[in-house]
Image (tube, rainbow, N blue to C red):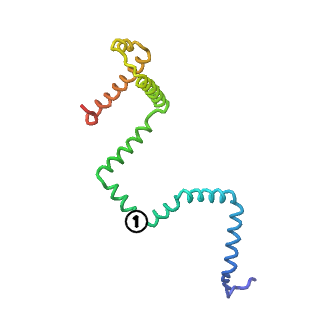
Amino acid sequence: MAKAIRQINKSTPNPVEEQMQAVTELMNAVTANKDALITTIDIIKGLNEMGVLDAAKAMLEQRTDIGAIAIQQLNQPNMHNTIKNGMNALKFIGSINPEQLQSILNGVTQGFERSAEVVKNGENQSLWKLGTSLRDPDVKASLSTMMEFLHGMGEAFNQDPQQGVH
């Protein structure tokens, strides 16, 4: 039969041995992650050269003052509207079909280029030429797009009269 354990010897770790084991573990980790550590050091060196680390250190030292200023700025009446408008703008941007937006932005870019040429050359069209340009397929396409835009905006205003400007 087994003999009962009557005394437990509690071993206390030697601080020197613990320190040596910690150093060994650190060296193994450094060796295993050498490339990542070198990249990290390069990034930190670049941030230090730019002065970012000094700015971050100063911000940490003054964090209570900076926090108080930030809270004061956020509590201004117009800031609430700014935050709400920003959230609505992000919601709006998220609802737009990227292909449609790209098409419209390409049209706007070309329109700006054409109008800049007219301004640069100092060309003014006669009323007759302006009237006949309504037959141009490009002008018709642009006007049709703008009219549909206005129809859609009006529909949205009429669905919720409080949002519309009447």
Residue topped by disc 1:
64
Horizontally, residue 160 falls left or right of residue 94, namely left
Q: Residue at x 43, y 36 (%)?
A: 95
Quarter of the image with the N terminus is bottom right
Horizontally, residue 39 falls left or right of residue 163, namely right
What amino acid type is highlighted by mark number 1?
Answer: Thr
Residue that lies at the very extreme toward the bottom in this rendered image: 6
The answer to whether residue 85 is above or below residue 130 is: below
The answer to whether residue 86 is above or below residue 122 is: below
Crowd band around label 1 with a 10 angstrom C-alpha radius: few (<14), some (14–19), many (20+): few
Q: Which of 131 and 153 is in front in this view?
A: 131
> x, y (%) of residue 14?
68, 82
Horizontally, residue 30 falls left or right of residue 65, namely right
> In which quarter of the view is residue 123 placed?
top left
Secondary element at tag 1: helix
> x, y (%) of residue 5?
69, 85
